[in-house]
Amino acid sequence: MSRATREEDLDTRIDLLRERIKDSDDLKVKGDVFDTRTLMNLYALASKGVIDALGGEISTGKEANLFYAIREGQELVIKIYRITTSNFQAMQDYMHGDPRFGNIKGTKRAVISAWTRKEFRNLKRAEEAGVRVPHPIVTRDNILIMELIGEKDNPAPQLRNVDLELDEAKRIFNKLSDYISLLYNKADLVHADFSEFNVLYDGDPVVIDMGQSVTLEHPMASKFLDRDVTNIARYFEKKYGIGSEEEIWSKVKVQ
C-alpha cells in the first residue's frame, strides 16, 4: 500500500469515527485531546464493540478529559490523557518506585500510556479488595474506559460539592476510612491523593483518579498514606466536626 493510499485509508476511517461521535465539531477545537493516534485508537475500540457512540465532554481535569460514551445501553466514561499537556515528569516520579512500571522510559506518549495502564490496574486491584471505584473496562494507549457514576445528564458530584446530614457524614467518613484500610491491607496500594476531590457521591462514596496510586514497595508509600489520612480527617473535621486521624489509623492498623 502506497503512502498516499495509507493516508486516504486513515482519513476514511477517521471520517467513519466522526460519524459515530456526537458533537464531532468539538474535535476541531480539541486538538490537544484528539490527535490522529487517539482518534485511531477510538476507532479501533468502536470497531471491537467496546463503545457504540461517543458523546459530549463531561469534564476537564489537570491531565485528562472525560467524555460520555454508550455501549449496548450502558453509560460509560472515556478518560483521555492529553499527550501534549500532561505533566509526564510528575507521572514518572510516581512510577519509578513502582515495581510494575519502574522501568518505563522513552517518549512522553510511552510514559502516559504506562500511566493509563497503571490506573487501570490500580482500579482493578481496588475493586477486587472491596473498594467501590468506577468499574474499569479497557485501556488502550492514553485511553481508559470505565463505568459512568451517575447518569449522562446528572453525573455523580465530587464529595466536596455535597452537603451531608451529620449521620450520613459519619457513615461516609467510616466508609472512606474502611477504603483506606482495604487499599493498604488487601490491595497493597496507597491512593496517594485521597481527598474530597477524588471521591464521588451517589448515595455512597466512589473512589476515583488512581493513576498516581502506588504499591507499598514505593519509597514514598508511607508519606503518601500519611497525607491521605490527614486529608480525609481534616475535611470531615472542618466541614462536619467529626472524625480524626486516630480513627482512620485504628482501621488501617487493625488488620
Image: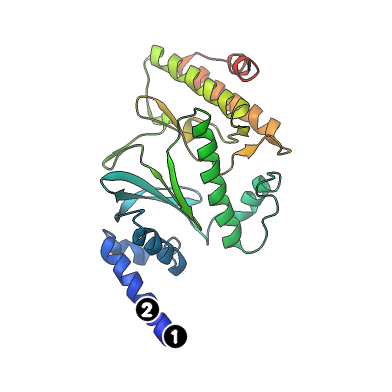
- Residue 29, percent across and down? 37, 64
Quadrant of the rendering where the C terminus is positioned: top right
Front residue (pair 139, 30): 139
Q: Position of residue 187 (x, y in %)?
A: 59, 32
Disc 1: CA contacts within 10 A as few (<14), some (14-19) or many (>=20): few
Disc 2, SS: helix
Q: Is residue 78 visible?
A: yes
Q: Categorize mark 2 by other alpha carbons within 10 Å: few (<14), some (14-19), many (20+).
A: few
Q: Quadrant of the N terminus?
A: bottom left
Contact? badges 1 and 2 (CB < 8 Å)? yes
Q: Write down the residue under mark 1.
A: 1
Q: How many marks?
A: 2
- Amino acid type at mark 1: Met
Please state the horizontal and vertical placement of residue 227, each as a whole percent of the image. Answer: 63, 29
Looking at the picture, does residue 138 appear above or below residue 161?
below
Question: Which residue is found at the position 59% from the left and 42% from the top?
Answer: 212
Mark sitting earlier along the chain (1/2): 1
